[in-house]
Image: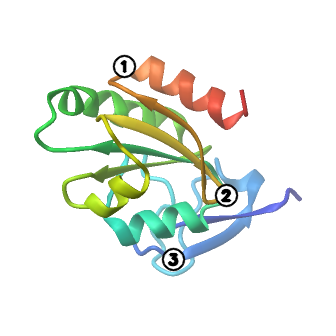
Amino acid sequence: MSDPVHVVCPHCDAVNRLSAGRLADQPVCGKCALGLFVAQPLDVGAEGFARHIGRNDIPVLVDFWAPWCGPCKMMAPAYKLAASQLEPAMRLLKLDTEQAQELAARYTIRSIPTIAMFKNGREVARQAGAMDAGGLVAWARAQAAGR
C-alpha cells in the first residue's frame, strides 16, 4: 500500500485521506460522495485558496487572473484543457485577483496571468504570461518533479 495523501474535495472542501496509489481510481469524497477530481480548474476565493494550498498533499497549480485581462481570457481554455491532463497528479485553481486583492498583494502578483505551483503549502515556482495548454502541462509537470 502506498503512502496516504490528503486531497481536498472540490465540492464540499472536506479533506480526504486516501492511498496515493488510488488517485487515478476516480476516488469520491467521504463526506459528500462526489468525485475528488473534476478535470477542470476550481474557481476559489481567499478561503478556498487557503484550504486547498494548506491541506492538499498533491501539488496545487494556481492561475492568478482578472476578468478584465485579455491574455487571461485567452489562456482560460488552455488552462481548462491542462486541468484535464494534469489531474489527479495535481489540483488546479483559479484565483480572481480583483476579488482577492489581499492575496494578490501577499504573493506579489505584479502581472497577470501568473501561474504559481504550490507544494506542502509553499510556493515553489512561478511563471508570468499566458501559455498554451502544452506549455502549461510541460511547465507544471517539470515543476512538480522538482526540475
Question: Do tag 2 and tag 3 residues touch (Cβ < 8 Å)?
Answer: no
Figure quadrant of residue 2: bottom right
Figure quadrant of residue 32: bottom left
* Along the line of sight, the residue nearer the viewer: 118 or 30: 118
- Is residue 33 depicted above or below 118 in this figure? below
The C terminus, quarter of image = top right
Q: Residue at x 84, y 60 (%)?
A: 3
Q: Amino acid at mark 3?
A: Ala
Q: Earlier in the sequence, mark 1 or mark 3?
A: 3
Crowd class of label 1 (few under 14; some 14 to 19; many from 20; radius 10 Å): some
Q: CA distance from mark 1 to mark 2?
A: 26 Å
Any mark on residue 14, and which?
Answer: 3
Q: State the residue position of label 2.
A: 120
Q: SS class of the residue under badge 1?
A: loop
The single residue placed furthest to the bottom in the displayed view is 31
Q: Earlier in the sequence, mark 1 or mark 2?
A: 2
* Along the line of sight, the residue nearer the viewer: 111 or 40: 111
Q: Amino acid at mark 2?
A: Asn
- Residue 85 image position (x, y, % from top left): 50, 32
> Can see residue 10?
no
Q: Amino acid at mark 1?
A: Asp
